[in-house]
């Protein structure tokens, strides 16, 4: 049988963030994958060099709308590392609270989309409704649903109003029953077990060689989490667990994200209940020459920033390494060998910025008229779930 | 493994290859090494010390091109940045991708943005820049000038 090439990407009429996957297939089996990025390259590292240290915080916040806390968190830590100072205790707690609420919303977003790809549109609707509640919380705390502008080198820009705390606690507690229901529904569902277990398995050795990050590495048994490895924010002051599983398949990655949501809820609640008083900002006036490194565990894995200063008010170099940069190449290890209908969910399992997976242009195979688009790919995936359900006698 | 053991081990093994040893704090080490010994030292840190490779960052200092490879030892949170200084006119260094698969992409990025030639890289293609970008124009070099005078700039207004 001749080999054909399926191209997924780079443009999708509904969503932003283009990426191009080129799958070499033989029949239904994927033989090889090539990932091409760069369609969204905006030269932010270069741009950051022409901004002051304060302005750069806003620029890098716009790298990603979903993790718009993670980049400023890592960047401000890098700048503080150049000076060699610790931010006030209250600022640490506020940073942690915003970062963890962001993790909840990001994981919920992924769960909804994963449900959609598998043909569980009820899950999709339920989870996204829940996510709205979380965005309301972020709006109450920061004034914005995204791009919160809470961070600045030396502290945070805005204090948490004591009147808001009870509202936030109520909302956060309010999502728990639904997540509990989803957890049971997902973990006990025989169809999902059949559909996701053993799919896209990523071994422990591969996770180490590819330097995978976040849930992608923790699902393969590599206990790697910046929040535990280095003491920063309020993470070393409160009690929480790092979730690690062993199998490395798509099912485990889903399990990690669901369980991490609980941990984040726990962290946010503890932080709000023990919020210390005091200053929230150190009012940095100048930044000495030197180099600084800052990292933060974003929902998708570690975000890493390197900043170099020459004593002026602008960085001379600002390197940004987002987690997906390390996680996308792992598809080379997980996708070959799978079927096209599984490719959708494997591509989605690393949680690349979410829209990548259903972006597919029509492609003609060398010998025939094999035409696919994004809807077809999702349909293939949903049909496979339906056929498993039929085989198991579930309606 | 404690930070002292890591420091001692590096000094003992690679004393001659280490050009500069700078400890910024007890959790942070910057060390400049000879270009020829980079792969050996990186491989020791990654495989023997079981460190994690974060990323690499290149910077044009006008006198040369510096590449920093960032590693960390996970249990102790000890961060090691290995620095090599390359010739500015003809920057080249051996690729780390034979030791660390995760270094492939970042080397491709430095290749196109700074013009560094990574010898022995299995797939040294452009990663981010468009195919229309002219050869020999490296956006992160200090003397970079905007080459396309007719480009339409979206100011986001």
Image: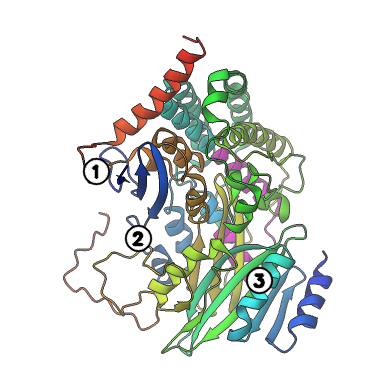
Q: Quadrant of residue A103?
A: top right
User: Do discs 2 and 1 belong to a common subunit?
Assistant: yes
Counting other residues with Cα less than 10 Å from the Cα at mark 1, is it few (<14), some (14-19), or many (20 or more)?
some
Q: Is residue B62 magenta?
A: no
Q: Is residue A213 left or right of residue A119?
A: right
Question: Of helix, strand and loop, which mostly describes the magenta segment?
Answer: helix
Q: Is residue A99 left or right of residue B9?
A: left
Label 3 vs label 2: CA separation? Answer: 33 Å
The residue at which mark 2 appears reads as A42
Counting other residues with Cα less than 10 Å from the Cα at mark 2, is it few (<14), some (14-19), or many (20 or more)?
few
The chain under label 3 reads B
Earlier along the polypeptide chain: callout 2 or callout 1?
Answer: 2
User: Do discs 1 and 3 belong to a common subunit?
Assistant: no
In the displayed structure, would residue B120 be above or below residue A350? below
Q: Position of residue A99 (x, y in %)?
A: 58, 45
**Between A43 and B56, which is closer to the camera in this rendering?**
B56
User: Do discs 3 and 2 belong to a common subunit?
Assistant: no
Which mark lies nearer to you, 2 or 1?
1
- Which residue is most to the left? B150
Q: Which mark is residue A259?
A: none
Q: Is residue A370 left or right of residue A74?
A: left
In the displayed structure, would residue A130 be above or below residue A352? above
Label 1 vs label 3: CA separation? Answer: 43 Å
The residue at which mark 3 appears reads as B43
Magenta region, residue range: A74-103
Q: Position of residue A254 (x, y in %)?
A: 57, 33
The residue at which mark 1 appears reads as A365
**Between A207 and A296, which is closer to the camera in this rendering?**
A207
Which mark lies nearer to you, 1 or 3?
1
Q: Position of residue B97 (x, y in %)?
A: 54, 68
Mark yes or no: residue A283 visible.
no
């Amino acid at each position: 049988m001749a080999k054909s090439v399926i191209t997924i990407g780079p443009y999708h009429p509904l969503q932003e963030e283009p990426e191009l996957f080129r799958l070499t297939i033989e029949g239904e089996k994927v033989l090889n994958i090539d990932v091409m990025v760069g369609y969204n390259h905006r030269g932010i590292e270069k741009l950051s060099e022409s901004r002051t240290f304060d302005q750069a915080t806003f620029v890098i916040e716009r790298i990603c709308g979903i993790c718009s806390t993670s980049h400023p968190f890592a960047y401000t830590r890098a700048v503080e590392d150049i000076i060699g100072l610790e931010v006030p205790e209250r600022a640490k707690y506020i940073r942690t609270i915003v970062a963890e609420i962001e993790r909840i919303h990001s994981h919920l977003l992924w769960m909804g989309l994963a449900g959609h790809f598998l043909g569980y549109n009820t899950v999709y609707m339920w989870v996204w409704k829940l996510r709205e509640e979380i965005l309301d919380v972020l709006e109450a705390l920061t004034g914005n649903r995204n791009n919160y502008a809470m961070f600045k080198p030396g502290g945070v820009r805005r204090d948490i109003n004591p009147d808001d705390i009870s509202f936030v606690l109520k909302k956060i507690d309010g999502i728990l029953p639904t997540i509990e229901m989803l957890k049971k529904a997902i973990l006990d569902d025989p169809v999902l077990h059949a559909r996701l277990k053993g799919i896209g398995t990523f071994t422990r050795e591969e996770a180490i060689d590819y330097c995978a990050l976040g849930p992608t590495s923790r699902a393969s048994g590599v206990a790697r989490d910046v929040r535990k490895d280095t003491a920063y924010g309020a993470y070393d002051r409160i009690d929480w667990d790092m979730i690690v599983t062993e199998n490395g398949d798509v099912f485990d990655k889903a399990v990690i994200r669901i369980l991490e949501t609980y941990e984040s809820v726990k962290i946010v609640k503890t932080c709000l209940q023990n919020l210390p008083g005091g200053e929230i900002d150190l009012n940095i006036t100048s930044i000495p020459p030197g180099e600084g490194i800052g990292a933060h565990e974003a929902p998708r894995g570690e975000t890493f920033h390197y900043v170099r200063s020459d004593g002026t008010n602008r960085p001379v170099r600002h390197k940004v390494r987002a987690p997906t940069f390390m996680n996308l190449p792992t598809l080379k290890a997980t996708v070959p060998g799978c079927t096209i209908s599984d490719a959708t969910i494997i591509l989605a399992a690393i949680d690349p910025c979410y829209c990548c997976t259903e972006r597919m242009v029509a492609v003609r195979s060398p010998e025939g008229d094999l035409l696919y688009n994004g809807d077809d790919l999702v349909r293939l995936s949903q049909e496979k779930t339906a056929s498993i359900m039929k085989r198991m006698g579930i309606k | 493994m404690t930070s002292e053991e890591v420091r001692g081990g590096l000094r003992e093994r690679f004393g001659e290859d280490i050009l500069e040893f700078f400890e910024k704090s007890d959790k942070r080490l910057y060390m400049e090494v000879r270009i020829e010994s980079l792969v050996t030292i990186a491989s020791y840190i990654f495989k023997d010390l079981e460190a994690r490779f974060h990323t690499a960052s290149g910077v044009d200092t006008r006198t040369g091109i510096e590449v920093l490879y960032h590693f960390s030892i996970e249990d102790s949170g000890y961060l090691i940045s290995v620095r090599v200084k390359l010739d500015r006119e003809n920057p080249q260094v051996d690729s780390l991708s034979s030791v660390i698969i995760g270094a492939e992409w970042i080397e491709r990025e430095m290749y196109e943005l700074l013009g560094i030639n990574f010898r022995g890289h299995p797939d040294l293609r452009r990663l981010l820049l468009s195919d229309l970008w002219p050869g020999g124009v490296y956006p992160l070099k200090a003397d970079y000038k905007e080459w396309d005078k007719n480009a339409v700039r979206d100011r986001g207004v």
